[in-house]
Amino acid sequence: MLNILRTPFFQFLTLAALLSSCGSQEKESSETQTVHNVFLINPVPADAAATRDFAGQVEEARTVGAAFKTGGTIEHIYAKEGYRVRKGQLLAVLDSIDYVLGTEQLRIQTARFKDEFARTTKLYATGGVSDYEKAKSGLRQLEYQLALNENKIKYCRLLSPADGVITAVNYETGEMTDAGRPLFDIMDNRHLEIVVDLPASEYMRSNEFTAFTGHSPLLPGKTFPLQMLSLTPRADNNQLFRLRLSPASDSDITLAPGMNITVTITAAGSGSDAVTVPVNSVFDHDGQTAVYTFNQSDSTISLTPVTISGTGADGNITVISGLSPSQPIVRAGVHHLVPGEKVNVIDQTSASNVGNLL
């Protein structure tokens, strides 16, 4: 028996068995090390009145072009870029000397023709002349030309068409301008709008919007009420719907075009299906928004598609479909996991888990 144990063949089998055993232990050890620790959390039912924040930007409601109604040489410009102007304020004048001289000449001609027409009228009454209608038409034509020239003199003064701020001066003194070409661009700063692009999920529940407020880092500690002006019923190429808001009429807040504003929208509850989850639990999987739900029966995780409607003021995401409060989900660290894998659930966040990513 001892001789058999000492044979080279038996020693080879023994070595092979030992190596196989070590490999199996290493494999089992490796598999054990790949099990991820996760921290679970249950979705929280959404409040009856939920708030969500969206990025907005201030825009002018309209920009008005101020142009002369007649052409000519610019004699003087009284306003510059950045000036605040009032409706009816004088902005610029044209050289009107030609119109003034032409108008004076027409006045003299019209006065003479009126005297001649008066004599013609007397003669016509006694049957002495037959060209009364011709004289009457000639006088009327002169009066029209005189009125036209008098208007042109008025048109040489350019008045602001609206209250606002001059954003551009397009000509300089001494240059020629044509009728209708804007000399000034005036931003109507009495009518500023805040523009927000809403995702389709928010548009679908826009009938639940109850209030709008705005705040900005440039206005620390200040919030101001907003009122909805319009919500376009048509999506753009990015499937976004444009919401236009304006500060409430009694608001004393000072805004300027280009300012970034955070708009908080308050909406009535959408029903018992809406829940909120931490932002780190939601991820994109092949273009689809999803979370990992935990299967208690076998300790595996499943990829669960969800529909979200934005981020609330508390930083959590509102899920309007796909989840219920009874479904535990992986709180964070989701990008290290794969669907179907087994996980190890820990009862609380690890002390070494900086930032509570588990």
Image: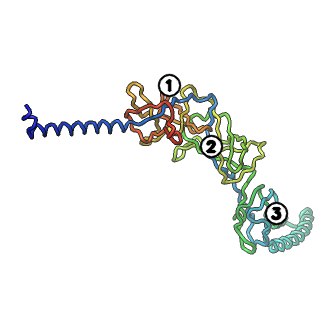
User: In front: mark 3 or mark 1?
Assistant: 1
Quick one: quadrant of the N terminus? top left
Residue at the spot 69% in from the left edge and 56% down from the top edge = 63
Going by the numbered disc 1, the residue's amino acid type is Ser
- Asked if one can make out residue 148 in the rendered structure from this viewpoint, the answer is no
User: Label 1, on which residue?
Assistant: 326
User: In front: mark 1 or mark 2?
Assistant: 1
Task: List the single residue furthest toward the front.
Answer: 2
- How many other residues sit within 10 Å of disc 2, few (<14), some (14-19) or many (≥20)? some
**Compared to 229, does 330 lie above or below?**
above
**Compared to 216, does 127 lie above or below?**
below
Residue 315 quadrant: top right
**Compared to 150, does 266 lie above or below?**
above
Mark 3 → mark 1, Cα distance in angstroms = 70 Å
Q: Are marks 1 and 2 in contact (CB under 8 Å)?
A: no
Mark 3 vs mark 1: which is more N-terminal? 3
Comparing 181 with 26, the one in front is 26
Left or right, 25 with reference to 169: left
Mark 1 vs mark 2: which is more N-terminal? 2
Going by the numbered disc 3, the residue's amino acid type is Leu
| Residue 310 location (% of width, % of height) | 56, 39
Comparing 10 with 134, the one in front is 10
Comparing 148 with 220, the one in front is 220
Residue at the spot 72% in from the left edge and 73% down from the top edge = 175
Mark 2 → mark 3, Cα distance in angstroms = 37 Å
Mark 1 → mark 2, Cα distance in angstroms = 35 Å
* Disc 2, SS: strand
Mark 2 vs mark 3: which is more N-terminal? 3
User: Label 3, on which residue?
Assistant: 90
User: Label 2, on which residue?
Assistant: 243
